């Protein structure tokens, strides 16, 4: 296995998961679409690279080199930085300027690199300094609750905080559900019905777009993560 990692959930209302990983050898794979954005910190050959990584609207190929230690902080939908709206780095890895080997610049302040254990404390400090905020309109829309604002205002809030439309996020979640069903041994035709697709070609197009594999490939070769 070319990547090994450990992952934990977070008690923070701003963070989905925190993952700590190592690349054991060079490698590449097909990665799925991703609706959430991340802060990523990579240590490689004595250098540190700090990045904000935007949502990934479609599946694609990812490659990595040997010997990297990586920390991923995955933020919940609706969490964003007002000075850097998510739609400004959609499908982009945006580097943050280094101050020294163990710190980086963010909104004109030098921040110490977080680690797997103190990532929540790091995020809490970003919240206290109002660098990170949570937009409640996004969560309401995802739960089919309509805030008392115009549809145009809701779309603006949603795009600024997530970089994606509500329908796009639904399509991604639908494809992930279908993938899980297929990995669990559910037949392709039953997956069409249970995941809410119109027909098998609709399922196939969705999985190729958002997961990177056809239903048959998922059923035959992929194992649950």
Image (tube, grey):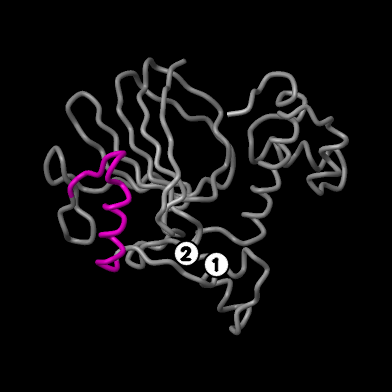
Residue 162 as seen in the image, left or right of residue 69: right
Q: For the point 38% across and 15% down, which residue is it?
A: 25
Residue 201 as seen in the image, left or right of residue 117: right
- Using the rendered view, name the quadrant where residue 137 is placed: bottom right
On screen, 34 above or below 26? below
Q: Classify residue 185 by image quadrant.
A: top right
Residue 38 in the image, given as x and y percentages of width and height: 41, 47
120 and 132: which is toward the camera = 120
On the image, numbered disc 1 is attached to which residue? 138
Q: Is residue 197 magenta?
A: no
With respect to residue 179, does 156 lie above or below? below
Which residue: 19% across, 31% down?
Answer: 47
Mark 1, other Cα within 10 Å: few <14 / some 14–19 / many ≥20: many
Q: Earlier in the sequence, mark 1 or mark 2?
A: 1
- Does the residue at mark 1 contact the one at mark 2 (Cβ under 8 Å)? yes
Q: What residue lies at 20% left-to-right and 48% top-to-bottom?
A: 97
Over which residues does the magenta segment extend?
A: 112-130
Q: Tag 2, which secondary structure?
A: helix
Q: Mark 2 sits on what residue?
A: 161
């Amino acid at each position: 296995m070319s990547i090994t990692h450990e992952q934990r959930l977070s008690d923070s209302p701003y963070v989905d998961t925190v993952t700590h990983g190592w690349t054991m050898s060079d490698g590449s794979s097909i990665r799925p679409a991703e609706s959430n954005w991340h802060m990523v910190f990579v240590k490689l050959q004595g250098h540190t690279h700090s990045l904000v990584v935007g949502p990934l609207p479609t599946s694609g190929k990812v490659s990595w080199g040997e010997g990297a230690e990586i920390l991923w902080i995955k933020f919940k939908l609706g969490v964003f930085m007002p000075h850097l709206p998510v739609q400004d780095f959609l499908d982009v890895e945006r580097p943050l300027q280094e101050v020294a080997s163990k710190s980086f610049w963010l909104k004109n302040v030098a921040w110490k690199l977080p680690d797997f254990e103190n990532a929540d404390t790091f995020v809490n400090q970003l919240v206290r300094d109002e660098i990170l905020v949570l937009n409640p309109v996004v969560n309401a829309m995802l739960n089919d609750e309509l805030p008392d604002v115009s549809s145009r205002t809701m779309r603006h809030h949603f795009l600024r905080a997530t970089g994606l439309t509500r329908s796009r996020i639904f399509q991604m979640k639908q494809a992930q559900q279908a993938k899980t069903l297929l990995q669990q041994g559910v037949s392709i035709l039953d997956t069409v019905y249970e995941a809410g697709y119109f027909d098998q070609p609709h399922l196939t197009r969705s999985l190729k777009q958002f997961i990177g594999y056809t239903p048959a490939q998922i059923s035959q070769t992929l194992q649950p993560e």
